[in-house]
Image (cartoon, coloured by chain):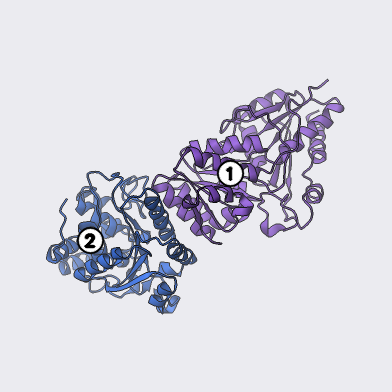
């Protein structure tokens, strides 16, 4: 019989709110932490920081290119700026500034993109970031983080501030389950094994981590032992854990709330190809844009639920045999 | 290094800098002479009179910051920095060569004394304002200066930053527009007119100072006027001549991004003797 998941899923807050709360804690501890925002502080939760530290909060208006540039200037003069907006605007509109003003000189800027993926819901595709992982990972030297719950977000915001260099942090709009106990520690670049398993490994990030845990439970009921890895750091990738997973379980499913072409999946596939080639399947958004709807309806329609992860697991097991 | 507010001495330095620019771009066989030559008096006045800096201590926290947002003007910046002692004058001959600290556009990784890596137009003003915000948070007295191209002001980010600067009352930031009226494809007025340029900056809430960008005494006065207003940022619109100092390059769009031939270098050096 396969082992059950180590961690029980309990109701929790949105990762964007966890970011906003963690930023305030950081602000209390370090006067060099500052925030810049582009008229979305009530949605990105940087307004907690703005209320407590008005002198260290810079409203940029709806001008993301300038927001990233101002953050780069603040960082160049010794500050630790967190620049936050919807991921679709911070990354897509601020991308060239992230490249030339942040990545290229290696400046200590933290970009936080909230409302990632399609789970933003009713607002529709213009507000949805489904390519931000691909874009951020293409920037040399950037660390790319995608926490799954409030505990890991809080820890990884702190890790991002302690890391001297560019970081992109992906945060979601909907409330998500708490996966981890408060004592859990996290390290940039080191994944967390949530479930031991021997038949296959599910590598998940962000919102799909909880879905992967649920899928592992479903598979366990069928007698399948699935290992689940929370790949909270997408860059630099934990290639050791991936190599071990490929070698020890012989089949991988990668699950993410992002375009399947260009996200975590292709990065894991590259690592697998270089170390221990094995059958792989991918759960992610197909080559399309989503639509308006409730988050639950959209995740269901576009194939990003535990059911879809379990189905991918069955497919990859069939190929393994 | 030599600091001076003497106009005659500053003009002599300008002549040396122009000779460096022509020689280094000629040797590199590529680069942007026109917009380097137009900004010579602006940078020489800044580095030898206005900026508080020390070539022996490029990381001095209290230094004023300088950003060349129009990064294609790198040769004038490198030549002025060499004259200040940030690098040996002989090193100017390595411009654009593999491994040189003098990259085609300013690159902090190769020349750490630079404040910024630039080259993608429209970005330096945001950077300067972020630096100014940091200085203000620290209660530090250093100022930030940023040179923009005129064509560069066609970028939308310049105006995002202009709004930010006035709104946040960034009185410790001074922008200088090298208004030489020419960009790569031709005359600014034919590519995308900027006029009424002064009114645009005034409308955005900046302290606007028009000046002849080749008149050192006038530039000194403009920098003093810019520093005197502390409740809003200043922009000095420096009216300049593209290719200034080399007759066949002056006001000729060809020399925005074309290196002089060896014969042209020889002719230019005679004019700059």
Which residue is found at the position 39% from the left and 75% from the top? B186
Q: Is residue B45 left or right of residue A194?
A: left
Classify residue B244 by image quadrant. bottom left
Could you tell me which residue is drawn at 68 percent across and 28 percent down?
A181
Q: Nearer the viewer, residue B196 or A48?
A: A48
**From what the image shows, is residue A256 above or below residue B195?**
above
Any idea which chain is the blue one in this picture?
B
Left of A248 or right of it: where is B272?
left
Q: Is residue A179 visible?
A: yes
Percent position of residue B169, x then y: 41, 62
**A52 up-or-down from B171: above or below:** above
Which residue is at 37% across, 64% downward?
B233
Asked whether, in this view, residue B19 is left or right of residue A82, the answer is left
The residue singled out by tag 2 in the image is B44
Q: Residue furthest top?
A: A1
> How far apart are the alpha carbons under marks 1 and 2?
42 Å
Numbered-mark total? 2
Q: Point out residue A185 in the picture as x, y percentages from the top left corner.
A: 60, 28
* Chain to which the residue tagged by mark 1 belongs: A
Quadrant occupied by the C terminus of chain B: bottom left
The chain letter corresponding to purple is A
Label of residue B84 in the image: none
Q: Nearer the viewer, residue A241 or A120?
A: A120
Q: Which disc, if any, is residue A169? A: 1
Looking at this view, is B222 or A49 the one in front?
Answer: A49
Considering every residue shown, the one lying at the far front of the view is A52
Q: Nearer the viewer, residue A258 or B255?
A: A258
- Residue B255's x, y, as percent? 32, 69
């Amino acid at each position: 019989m396969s082992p059950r998941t180590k961690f029980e899923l309990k109701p929790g807050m949105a990762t964007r709110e966890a970011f906003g709360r963690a930023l305030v804690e950081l602000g209390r501890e370090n006067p060099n932490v500052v925030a810049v925002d582009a008229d979305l502080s009530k949605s990105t939760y940087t307004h907690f920081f703005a209320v407590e530290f008005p002198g260290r909060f810079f409203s940029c208006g709806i001008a993301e290119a300038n927001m990233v540039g101002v953050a780069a200037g603040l960082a160049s003069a010794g500050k630790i700026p967190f620049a936050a907006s919807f991921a679709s605007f911070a990354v897509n509109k601020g991308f060239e500034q992230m490249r030339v003003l942040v990545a290229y000189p290696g400046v200590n800027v933290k970009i936080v993109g909230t409302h990632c993926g399609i789970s933003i819901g009713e607002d529709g595709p213009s507000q949805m970031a489904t390519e931000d992982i691909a874009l951020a990972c293409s920037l040399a030297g950037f660390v790319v983080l995608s926490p799954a719950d409030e505990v890991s977000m809080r820890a990884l915001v702190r890790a991002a501030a302690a890391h001297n260099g560019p970081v992109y942090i992906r945060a979601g709009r909907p409330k998500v389950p708490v996966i981890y106990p408060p004592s859990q520690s996290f390290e940039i670049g080191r994944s967390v094994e949530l479930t031991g398993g021997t038949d296959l490994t599910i590598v998940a990030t962000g919102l799909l981590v909880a879905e992967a845990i649920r899928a592992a439970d479903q598979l366990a009921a069928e007698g399948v032992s699935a290992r689940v890895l929370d790949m909270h750091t997408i860059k630099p990738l934990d290639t050791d854990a991936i190599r071990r997973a490929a070698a020890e379980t012989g089949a991988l499913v990668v699950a993410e709330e992002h375009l399947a072409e260009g996200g975590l999946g292709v990065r894991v596939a590259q690592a697998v190809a270089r170390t221990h080639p094995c059958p792989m399947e991918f759960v992610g958004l197909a080559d399309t844009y989503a639509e308006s709807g409730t988050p639950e309806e959209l995740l269901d329609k576009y194939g990003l639920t535990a059911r879809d992860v379990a189905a991918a697991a069955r497919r990859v097991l069939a190929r393994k045999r | 290094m030599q600091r001076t507010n003497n106009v005659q001495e500053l003009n002599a330095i300008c002549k040396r800098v122009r000779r460096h620019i022509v020689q280094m771009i000629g040797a590199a066989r590529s680069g942007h002479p026109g917009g380097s030559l137009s900004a010579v008096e602006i940078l020489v006045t800044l580095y030898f009179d206005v900026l508080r800096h020390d070539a022996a201590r490029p990381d001095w926290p209290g230094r004023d910051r300088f950003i060349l947002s129009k990064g294609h003007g790198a040769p004038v910046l490198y030549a002025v920095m060499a004259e200040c002692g940030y690098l040996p004058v002989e090193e100017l001959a390595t411009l654009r060569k593999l491994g040189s600290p003098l990259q085609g556009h300013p690159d902090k990784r190769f020349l750490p004394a630079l404040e910024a890596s630039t080259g993608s137009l429209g970005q330096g003003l945001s950077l300067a304002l972020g630096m100014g915000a940091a200085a203000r948070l620290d209660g530090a007295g250093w100022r930030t200066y940023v040179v923009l191209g005129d064509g560069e002001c066609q970028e939308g980010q310049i105006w995002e930053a202009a709004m930010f600067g006035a709104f946040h009352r960034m009185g410790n930031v001074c922008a200088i527009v090298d208004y030489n009226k020419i960009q790569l494809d031709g005359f600014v007025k034919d590519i995308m007119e900027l006029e009424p340029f002064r009114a645009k900056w005034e409308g955005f809430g900046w302290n606007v100072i028009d000046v002849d960008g080749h008149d050192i005494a006038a530039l000194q006065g403009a920098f003093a006027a810019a520093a005197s207003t502390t409740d809003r940022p200043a922009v000095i619109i420096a009216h300049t001549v593209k290719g200034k100092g080399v007759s066949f390059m002056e006001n000729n769009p060809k020399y925005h991004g074309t290196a002089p031939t060896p014969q042209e270098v020889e002719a230019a050096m005679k004019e700059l003797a």
